[in-house]
Image (tube, rainbow, N blue to C red):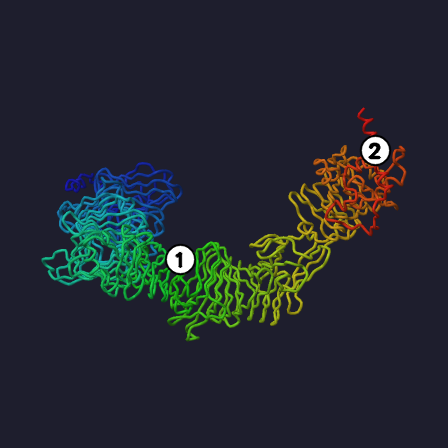
Amino acid sequence: MATRWFLVKTVPLACVAMLTAASASAVDYTWNVPAGGAQSWTNPANWDPNTGAPITADDTANLGIGLAGNLTLDLGATDVTVGGITFGGTTAAVTTDVNTTGGNLILNSNAANATITSGGVAGSVNRISAAVVLGDAVDFSAASTQSVTLAGNLGMTGAARAITNSMTGGPTLTIGSGSNSTIQLYDVFAPATGYQLQLNVLRDTTGTSSLTTVINARWNNTGASGSSLALGANNANPGATYVLLQSQTSTAGVTINRQGYLLAADNALGLGQATMSNNNVQVWGAELRSNDDARVLTNTRLQMGNPIAVTGSNSLTINATLGQSNNNRAFGNALIAGKTLTFAGGTASPAIAITTASDNVGRIFTIDGPGTTIVSGSVVNALDPATDPTTTGNFIKRGTGRLELNNALNTISGSIAANGGLLVFGTAGSYGAATSTIGVGDGGGVSYRPGTADPGFATFAAKLVATSTGFMALPQADSAANLDFSSAGTLATAPGLSVVGDGDMTYTGVVTPGTSGYNWGGLSGNLTLGSNASVGANTVSYRNGGTVILTGNQTYAAATTIQGATMVTAQNGIASRSGNSYTGTTGIVFASTLSVSQVSNAGSASTLGSSSGDAANLVIDRGVLRHTGGSTSSTDRLFTIGAGGATLESTGAGAVTFGSAGGANQLSGTGGRTLTLGGAGTGKNTVASQLTNGIDAVNDLLSVTKAGAGTWVLSGSNSYTGATTVSAGALLINGDQSLATGAVSVASGATLGGTGTVGGLTTLASGATLSPGASPGTLTFSQSLSLTSGANYNWQMLSATGSAGAANAWDLINVVGGLSIDSTSADPFKINLWTLSGTGPDISGNAANFSSSQDYTWKIATAAGGITNFATDKFSIISSATNGTGGFSNPYGSGTFSIAQSGNDLNLVFTRGAAPAVITINVATGTQTQTQAGYPLLSGTTPVVKTGAGTLVVDQANTLTGSTTVQGGVLKVANASALGSSTLAVVAGGTAQVASYLTTTVGGLNLSGTGLVDVTSGFVTVASGLSATDLVNQIIAGRNSGLWTGTSGITSSTAAADVALSIPRAVGWLDNGSGSVSFAFAAPGDTNLDWQVNILDVANVLALGKFDTGAPATWAQGDFNYDGLVDVLDVADFIATGLYNQGIYNAPPVTLGAVAAVPEPSSMTVMALAGLAGGAAAVARRRKR
């Protein structure tokens, strides 16, 4: 460096004189070569003013101009001093680089701290590649908008120096450009003199200044005394982050502060002692974050003046002694699940020294947080036992995480407290010296990993403190181990510990309880118990968080308690490095859950034991009783809600009922509390017993919250006066809650319904839903109700006629107070119409008794206190399926819905539209009745057209006078008056079918193309318009040579099926006179279509004289084969049926009118039939020839 200073003297005298003159006073120089390129810093021609160059501590250099290209400035061979630099091209994204051919850039200002402002347009690159020497403190200005890099070496001269990064807008300060860059922790011009370099002294204790400093260099102290590096300042800017990219080899001391440190290389804090600065503020300090699961820190010591925490998503191993000196400190672990923080200690040094001071004062060391911590090195009372011979070390595990002490050489001599999460003793001796004790607090647990059979278990158990209330987690190998908490047992020292597994476990061992009864559960895993895990006259407590699953009944006879845990921890403040005191002033509540698949009544063995149903025998305090069954179950037990509240959940398909009508649940303790009804089960769950306040009706208030997607019913006469909050799913009020006067609120997406009375003032959020009734019904509000913007009324109707609010009619909201319409036209209250075709369960479909040709007025709300702020445009009526409804299924043509006020009533009004020119009923597939298709009654002169390939069943007594046309599929006539006086037209592609055994009449009948009428086993009369000749032609088309399988005309599918079985059947016909004809399913010989073959039919054949005359004949005259004649073939068909005098052959019988008594056939009749038979036989022989 001496040579460099001599080089100043080699500058030509004329140049020296010029520079000296230019620097006689402070000058702000601005770069004036906008073209960029490679330029000289010391050339006055490049600056404005051009009388000199910025080379003294009084000068500043402004490079932030409109540069056309990249700019590289060469300092030259000699050092250059400047008081401040502004970087960045203002018109284009360019690179500005201050480089050197030998000289240092000395940052030193006579006015104040030297300043660097890094600006320019987005994308600008600002860099100092020359070595930088700090002759003063340097500020990186808050006015900076772009990142900046000190790419060369960084050193100091004259004294310790500091760099303040105030670039809070997002720019990054980077120091170094790789492992060849050096941070020189000594005087550059006097290397034997060491200094401290402090990076970032911006003080912003709010943590809102998000600053990033990247250290991409290795620091070096070259053996100089007094060298150190401070990253941050004491209690300054917890929002700052340091990114440490290089693996360090220096033993210089490093101080870290209340900022974040990304450890992007092993040994990123060097090899010497790293100290967390002591600011005596009880908040979380430095936050260490690894970016690699194999990351290692190997410092001689990691000394905590303030608490330190590890966060992030990668594991970290610390091969250093973690120590504290003047205060009790905590180390926090907030790593994500599956990652570990490991304290391994040094080669010959412990992992944790509870004290590193030499004052013989005992201290407390705490590990907190939700992460997993493994201490493989030893934990000792004092780093130097020789200077602290009687020090008593105390150790605390806190937070929800897991901590394993795995070293048998631990010397902890005081108390070990597991006050949260799980503390695992990995080996005998890991629990410390002979004098140590182990206390287990609420929400905390201990586990002895070698297991109950290990000789060290007895020593471990003997250390347990009698007042312990936490849990003991069994290793998996102990899932069948027997545990004795009785006075003579190994675990008599801690009878209050609850039992759980280290991880999920099915426990099959036997527990002998102590004085506190059976205790199950803990945060370390789900515990599954079979039948009779708890027996005798013992109490049972499910506690310390976690879930206990019962797969069988229990026979214990005393009380059941489901008790949550409160854990005092500071883990929530770790990530922010602010907020919670690290000493743990915040309590986290963990619910304990008892999960059962069924419940039973009191007094019998059940999942809740066999005690009586008194409320004192089932206490839920910060706990959850969860029903998971797939089938319905119920219990008449009452229950007590503790001061911490209680939760009932249903998560299965089966509904569950708690309590019995008339019984009242109880509250224990003082103060307000909440009963939460939760779960996403699909059953309709019920609390049947009464919900009341506590003894102090003013302060011991009960509130009810409905959570989860499922449905809960309150059916008791409840009188609690806390709030009722429906935050999700559905809450149905089916009991009288007129005395439950607390406020009621319904959140977006949640539903309030039922058939009872809501006692409190009710508020609906936008998106909330009212759903009166259990299916249609009435929901009453004893106070006022406001219909707000965006809220919903799911209005159900089973029948369009009846009484408002009746179960067989439609929904009604009954408000005892006032009903205020507080929606707006821009954001209206929604009325979602929902018609039902059935209930129990609700079946979306067409409501009964609705006709689109009629007007209706349905009262849907009434308010004794009056209706205010009404306007029709404040409502939106939605007839399509929405918000869980099935929509208004009945066809209503061009009719319209509207809302009207009539006095104290709010009415839904349907106004019929103009009558349609044609009623088209389309059944695309399948089968629908006319009601299902939306037409419960067809009447009037409007033509009806059946379309679609499906089947329409017309089954009502309709009064149609207009035509009925079948264009596709099947129209099935299933009522004698189904078509009224309508003319039936069946065209190509359509089929009209008569229901079996049905007798019906149509006004007329027209068949065209391939139109088909299937009479089946029925009877049809055509009033007019169809001649006998046309009728016979249609029958012949359907007869298909006697097979009755024609695809057009008139046929009978019943006759076709009989003929296929060689049973002679046909379609017969009659001319009724006056233009009326009939046709029906018939047997040959049944001339009068009365579905009997008897003497009257014989008489018709013999008496009318058509036999064998060749004269034209009808069915009634004996032409049964449709050849137009009566001959021996017809007589043969007559006889072949075998039906003569056998009664009605088409069951069930149908009466067609009075039938005269038929006498027994005379001998002449028999002879006539025989003669005809003989003649028929002769003719048959002749035909064979």
Say few, some or many: other residues with alpha carbon within 10 Å of mark 1 (under 14 / 14 to 19 / 20 or more). many
- Residue sitting at 81 percent across and 51 percent down? 1153
For mark 2, give the secondary structure: helix
Query: Relative to residue 254, is residue 633 depicted above or below?
Result: below
Locate residue 719 relative to residue 75 in the image: left or right: right
**Depth order, front residue of 34/491:** 491
Residue 111 appears anywhere in the view: no
> Is residue 1136 at all visible to an observer of this figure?
yes
Location of residue 602 in the rendering, given as x and y in whole percent from the top left corner: 43, 65
| 89 with respect to 936 (left or right) | left
Q: Amino acid at mark 1?
A: Ser
Q: Is 961 positioned to the left or the right of 849 in the image?
A: right
Type of residue at label 2?
A: Gly
* Depth check, front residue: 239 or 227: 239
Q: Residue furthest front?
A: 1163
Viewer-side residue, 213 vs 1169: 1169
How many marks can you see?
A: 2
Percent x, y of residue 422? 28, 56
Q: Which mark is residue 1167?
A: none
Query: Residue placed farthest to the left in the image?
Result: 386
Q: CA distance from mark 2 to mark 1?
A: 89 Å
| Above or below, 832 relative to 674 | above
Q: Which residue is mark 2?
A: 1174
Which picture quadrant has residue 540? bottom left
Q: 781 left or right of 308?
A: right
The disc label shown at residue 595, or none? 1
